[in-house]
Amino acid sequence: MILWFTIVQVVVAVAAGLFCIIAGLAGRRPSDWSVGSLALVELLLVAQVVIAIVSPFAGNPPSGSLLEFWVYLVSAVLLPFAAVAWALLERSRWSTVIMGVAALSIAVMVWRMQVIWTLQAA
């Protein structure tokens, strides 16, 4: 996995998470900005899926547990959809906070995927 891309993913997910949490605590219902921030996280996760599929063919196979890696990846890809769907159905400020928590959870999963791929210190 490309380390700089992982760092960008983590920074974007943390920024989106903090944005949503602050907006939710400020009493804002889900806005285009908060939903859009999770959409950006989702686009980066789709790129992560492509990289994960192509990397072994480029001579960069994962060094850790492949099952754990794909469980994190599938969870991270599905989490934004679930958070946004709930936010759009509920339309409360707390659903905006939940979107933020989902984004922060994704940041942790993406970093863990990097650790699994390169066997860096956990």
Image (tube, grey):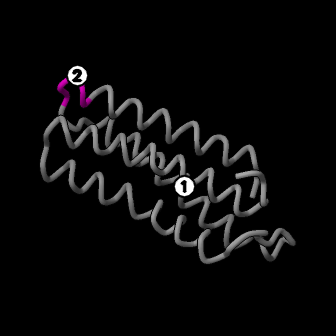
Q: Residue at x 24, y 56 (%)?
A: 85
Are there few (<14), some (14-19), or many (20+) residues within 10 Å of tag 2? few
Total labels: the figure holds 2
Q: Say above or below: 65 vs 32.
A: below
The residues colored magenta run 24-28
> x%, y% of residue 108?
54, 48
Splitting the image into 4 quarters, where does residue 99 fall?
top left
Whether 26 is among the magenta residues is: yes
Q: Earlier in the sequence, mark 1 or mark 2?
A: 2
Query: What label does residue 26 carry, if any?
Result: 2
Q: Is residue 106 above or below residue 113?
A: above
> What secondary structure do most residues of the magenta stretch adopt?
loop
Q: CA distance from mark 1 to mark 2?
A: 27 Å
Question: According to the image, label 1 marks what residue?
Answer: 109
Name the residue at 54% across, 61% down: 46
For the residues bearing labels 1 and 2, Cβ distance under 8 angstroms: no
- Residue 36 in the image: x percent, y percent? 37, 42
